[in-house]
């Protein structure tokens, strides 16, 4: 192959760049896949980001893709690109365990909508990525799969629940990956691994019943660049007959660089009273300063939120939705569950005592209105993704967490993602902001007005151009 990417770092080639090289015949889909598979063999034993590899099928798909590029003509948008799928995104005929030992023999009878769209677009699902049980933790470890570690620092977590996808991208196991997000599960791993994650507005990307009806949830793309995240988002999005909440197709996202001049950006460091670590705050302010230097109008704003209320409101919601679903799935197998799963179900159950679903909706509406008021007159809002710079890889965090010099009762109160699941019509793009003192990346969230996906990608592309995160290549074994 030719170009700036050499055989020694081919596993870090971006998806958009790879497509260009496929089309020019300077790179074969087979070459890229084999480089990725070699990287997995070399590094995954230390990172443990994958539940399964589909090597034989992937090689056959890569050979077919190469033949299509030779033949020319119309080409599918992801043709020949490896894609790592979060395990919860079912593949027909493959295990769908939700990370549970008791469900390790359960086999899916159909592809998840995002998987069927990726395959129809020519993407090659070559690996599946780890999650915590039920995707209910922001660390990624389970009795079934063990501990997934951050490629930048193996003692630390890549976050969760899409931690396997974030770690796989950061370690060079794939150029694209799928994630999902009900409380930050795409954005937190993006922050901790120096990657890009998109929490699409509710309904943009189809899901699977019955939890597709949960207005906190959403599936989305993860990648190493904004343009690559846009590429995968375009494939995943759009109305689907299996999910009647899904929205009609819109104009494709580009993720390409556009001027930041004239953008009006609201900067909110604490989202009320979140206790933000000093290095996280410094990196967030550096992003805002870069945008301002490029001609954006940046103003600092405040929100009247508290972490205690966010926790109460969100767990009221989970107590009426995800919690009961988890209890139904685990009845009779409680003894084999991870400690964080048991605590999640107990916390969700306790939150509903004397609190109706309607009470939660009323609180959510008030919080959404406060966000709308603060964002009025701005194109987007920028804030940290997590107040705490890191999580320990194998901790259950049953006794809370310490951040900003204080102890919080629940470790989720150290994450700044949940407010935008409560306000889940807002698109949120998570991009890297710098490096933490502990040696792993930090991230910012770019929050848009409801269903204004274009703007968050425009701002994200500007941040990427102004503050390129070359540190994403400084990984173990390199």
Image (cartoon, rainbow, N blue to C red):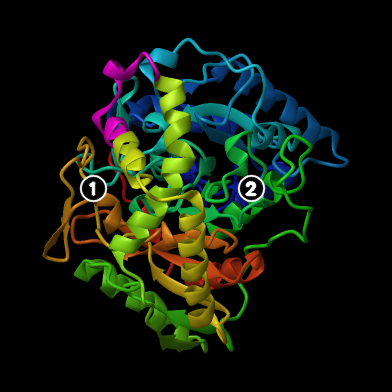
Q: Nearer the viewer, mark 1 or mark 2?
A: 1
Residue 441 visible at all? yes
Q: Quadrant of residue 135?
A: top left
Quadrant that contains the N terminus: top right
Mark 2, Cα crowd under 10 Å, few <14 / some 14-19 / many 20+, is many
Residue 27 image position (x, y, % from top left) = 64, 40
Q: Is residue 402 above or below residue 167?
A: below
The residue sitting at 74% across, 38% down in the picture is 121
Q: Give the mark, 1 or 2, whose residue is nearer the N terminus.
A: 2
Q: Is residue 335 magenta?
A: yes
From the viewer's side, name the closer residue of 307 and 161: 307
Q: Mark on residue 391? A: 1
Residues marked 1 and 2 touching at CB (< 8 Å): no
From which residue to which does the magenta span run? 331-343
> Chief secondary structure of the magenta span?
helix
Q: Quadrant of residue 171?
A: top left
Q: Is residue 187 left or right of residue 82?
A: left
Residue 471 visible at all? no
């Amino acid at each position: 192959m030719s170009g700036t990417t050499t055989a020694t770092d081919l596993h870090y080639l971006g998806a958009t760049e790879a497509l260009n090289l496929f089309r020019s015949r300077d790179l074969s889909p087979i070459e890229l896949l084999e480089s990725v598979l070699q990287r997995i063999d070399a590094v995954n034993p230390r990172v443990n980001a994958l539940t399964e590899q589909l090597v034989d099928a992937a090689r056959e798909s890569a050979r077919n893709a190469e033949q299509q590029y030779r033949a020319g003509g119309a080409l599918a948008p992801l043709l020949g690109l490896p894609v790592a799928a979060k395990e919860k995104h079912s593949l027909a005929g493959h295990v769908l365990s939700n990370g549970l030992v008791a469900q390790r023999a359960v086999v899916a009878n159909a592809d998840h909508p995002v998987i069927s769209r990726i395959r129809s677009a020519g993407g090659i699902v070559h690996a599946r990525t780890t999650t915590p049980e039920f995707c209910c933790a922001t660390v990624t470890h389970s009795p079934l799969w063990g501990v997934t570690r951050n490629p930048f620092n193996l003692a630390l977590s890549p976050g969760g629940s899409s931690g396997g996808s974030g770690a796989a991208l950061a370690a060079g196991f794939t150029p694209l990956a799928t994630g999902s997000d009900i409380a930050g599960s795409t954005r937190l791993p993006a922050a901790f691994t120096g990657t890009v994650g998109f929490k699409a507005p509710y309904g943009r990307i189809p899901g699977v019943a019955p939890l597709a009806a949960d207005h906190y949830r959403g599936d989305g793309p993860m990648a190493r660049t904004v343009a690559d995240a846009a590429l995968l988002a375009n494939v995943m999005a759009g109305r689907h007959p299996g999910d009647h909440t899904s929205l009609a197709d819109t104009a494709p996202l580009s993720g390409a660089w556009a001027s930041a001049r004239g953008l009006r950006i609201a900067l909110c460091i604490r989202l009320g009273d979140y206790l933000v670590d000093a290095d996280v705050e410094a990196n967030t302010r550096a992003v805002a300063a870069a945008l301002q230097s490029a001609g954006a109008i940046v103003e600092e704003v405040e929100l009247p939120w508290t972490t205690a209320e966010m926790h109460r409101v969100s767990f009221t919601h989970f107590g009426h939705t995800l919690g009961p679903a988890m209890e139904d799935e685990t009845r009779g197998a409680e003894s084999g569950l991870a400690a964080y799963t048991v605590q999640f179900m107990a916390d969700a159950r306790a939150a509903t005592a004397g609190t109706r679903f309607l009470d939660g909706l009323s609180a959510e509406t008030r919080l959404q209105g406060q966000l709308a008021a603060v964002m009025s007159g701005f194109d987007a809002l920028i804030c940290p993704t997590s107040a705490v710079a890191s999580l320990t890889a194998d901790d259950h965090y049953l006794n809370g967490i310490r951040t900003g010099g204080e102890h919080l009762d629940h470790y989720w109160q150290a994450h700044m993602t949940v407010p935008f699941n409560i306000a889940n019509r807002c698109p949120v793009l998570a991009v890297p902001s710098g490096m933490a003192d502990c040696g792993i990346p930090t991230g910012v969230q770019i929050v848009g007005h409801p269903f204004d996906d274009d703007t968050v990608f425009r701002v994200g592309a500007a941040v990427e151009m102004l503050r390129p995160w070359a540190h994403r290549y400084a990984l173990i074994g390199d």
